[in-house]
């Protein structure tokens, strides 16, 4: 109960003073956000789990560098992004940009795996997650950070190394592309939303 | 109708409010946007394995927190390197400035000035005792920094 009432800053201060076990509070609190974000970069859950664990280990080792200028989650998501980009670079050394057409083609091919009968049985939540996964890593990351990661445009800008206005435009485009994906692949469900 | 207020100025907000109150196309688009927002906000997060926290805690139990970067970067070292580089650049600029002999042009004012680069004795520069001393200091400084970096890495690996 006491641990649940502690703020992130208080937990970090105590971990830095030597209470290592308290770091579990932060892991428990952010593991789903981190895992979801990492899954936006890789479809493989085992890889995602490994990267996510690595993110928390890096965060722990670099905890003394967290100056509290931004939220802990913003700082943590910056580590998520760099770790995922490093992972992708190791996996596919020829990829030059996350907006690369090839990435989109791969993702478009991935779409064909969905069958109409299984789509009908999917819950609405699963449908949204599937649709987000069809977006490029940048688009899905920006949507996840904004809607699920509780990050402002400024904070997303800090994580992605972009100007907040650029983030705003990218978010708008990502939303539009998500809407297109939903209408293309889940047209019946989307009709119900109107 | 508060979705768009996060980043707009009051004037823009008022203009959008006006459109939303009067224009049915705007109203329809805004309703769709609200639906999408609702859908996204309701979407669930992915859940990692049950052992996730345990795995992380086991992994960090064998490691320590690295000292803050600002603590082990000595500002005097950075200042020293900066001073060294600035003095090198300033020295070169002054040297070339002394060597510079403008040639008067007879045909056109737009002619490229002769900097006299072909007249500079480069062997004199590179065989100079001062240059050798600078190179020696720079090499030694590099070795000292490399040694410090290796020591720090070894300490971090041990912890």
Image (cartoon, rainbow, N blue to C red):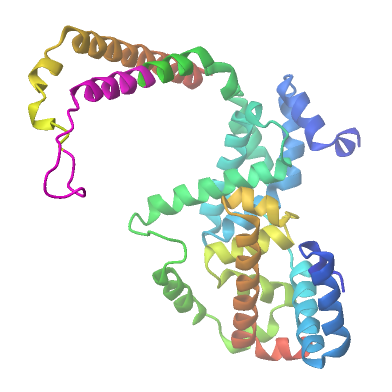
Q: Quadrant of the N terminus of chain B?
A: bottom right
Question: Which residue is at the far front?
Answer: B106
Q: Is residue A40 left or right of residue A25?
A: left
**A21 shown above or below A100:** above
**B42 shown above or below B104:** below
Q: Quadrant of the C terminus of chain B?
A: top right
Q: Residue at the location (80% across, 73% down)? A: B38
Which of the pair A91/B143 is nearer the observer? Answer: B143
Q: Position of residue A153 (x, y in %)?
A: 70, 57
**A168 shown above or below A91:** below
Q: Is residue A80 visible?
A: yes
Q: Position of residue A68 (x, y in %)?
A: 73, 34
Which of the pair A128/A100 is nearer the observer? Answer: A100
Q: Position of residue B88 (x, y in %)?
A: 31, 19
Q: Which residues are magenta?
A: B86-113
Count of numbered marks: 0
Q: Residue at the location (55% across, 62% down)? A: A138
Which of the pair B26/A23 is nearer the observer? Answer: B26
**A62 shown above or below B147:** below
Q: Is residue B51 visible?
A: no
Q: Position of residue A22 (x, y in %)?
A: 76, 30
Which of the pair A3/A62 is nearer the observer? Answer: A62
Q: In which image quadrant can residue A185 be found?
A: bottom right
Q: In which image quadrant can residue A75 be found?
A: top right
Residue B104 part of the magenta segment = yes
């Amino acid at each position: 109960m006491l641990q649940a009432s502690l703020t992130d800053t208080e937990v970090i201060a105590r971990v830095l003073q030597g209470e290592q076990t308290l770091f579990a509070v932060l892991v428990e609190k952010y593991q789903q956000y981190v895992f979801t974000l990492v899954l936006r970069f890789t479809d493989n859950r085992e890889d995602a789990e490994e990267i996510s664990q690595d993110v928390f280990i890096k965060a722990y080792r670099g905890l003394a560098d967290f100056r509290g200028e931004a939220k802990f989650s913003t700082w943590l998501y910056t580590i998520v992004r760099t770790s995922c980009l490093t992972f992708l670079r190791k996996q596919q050394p020829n990829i030059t940009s996350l907006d690369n057409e090839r990435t989109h083609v791969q993702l478009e091919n991935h779409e064909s795996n969905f069958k109409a009968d299984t789509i009908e049985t999917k819950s609405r939540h699963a449908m949204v997650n599937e649709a987000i996964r069809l977006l490029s890593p940048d688009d899905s990351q920006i949507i996840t950070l904004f809607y699920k990661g509780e990050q402002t445009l400024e904070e997303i800008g800090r994580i992605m190394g972009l100007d907040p206005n650029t983030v705003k435009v990218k978010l708008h485009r990502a939303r539009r592309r998500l809407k297109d994906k939903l209408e293309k692949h889940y047209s019946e469900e989307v009709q119900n939303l109107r | 109708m508060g979705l768009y207020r996060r980043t707009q100025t009051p004037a823009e907000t008022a203009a959008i409010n006006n459109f939303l109150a009067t224009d049915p196309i705007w109203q329809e688009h805004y309703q769709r946007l609200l639906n999408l927002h609702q859908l996204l906000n309701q979407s669930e997060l992915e859940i990692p394995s049950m052992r996730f926290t345990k795995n992380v805690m086991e992994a960090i139990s064998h490691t320590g927190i690295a000292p803050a970067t600002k603590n082990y970067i000595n500002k005097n070292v950075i200042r020293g390197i900066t001073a060294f580089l600035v003095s090198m650049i300033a020295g070169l600029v002054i040297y070339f400035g002394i060597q510079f002999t403008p040639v008067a042009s007879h045909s056109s004012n737009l002619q490229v000035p002769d900097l006299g680069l072909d007249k500079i004795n480069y062997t004199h520069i590179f065989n100079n005792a001062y240059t050798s001393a600078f190179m020696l200091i720079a090499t030694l400084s590099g070795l000292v920094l490399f040694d410090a970096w290796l020591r720090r890495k070894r300490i971090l690996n041990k912890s």
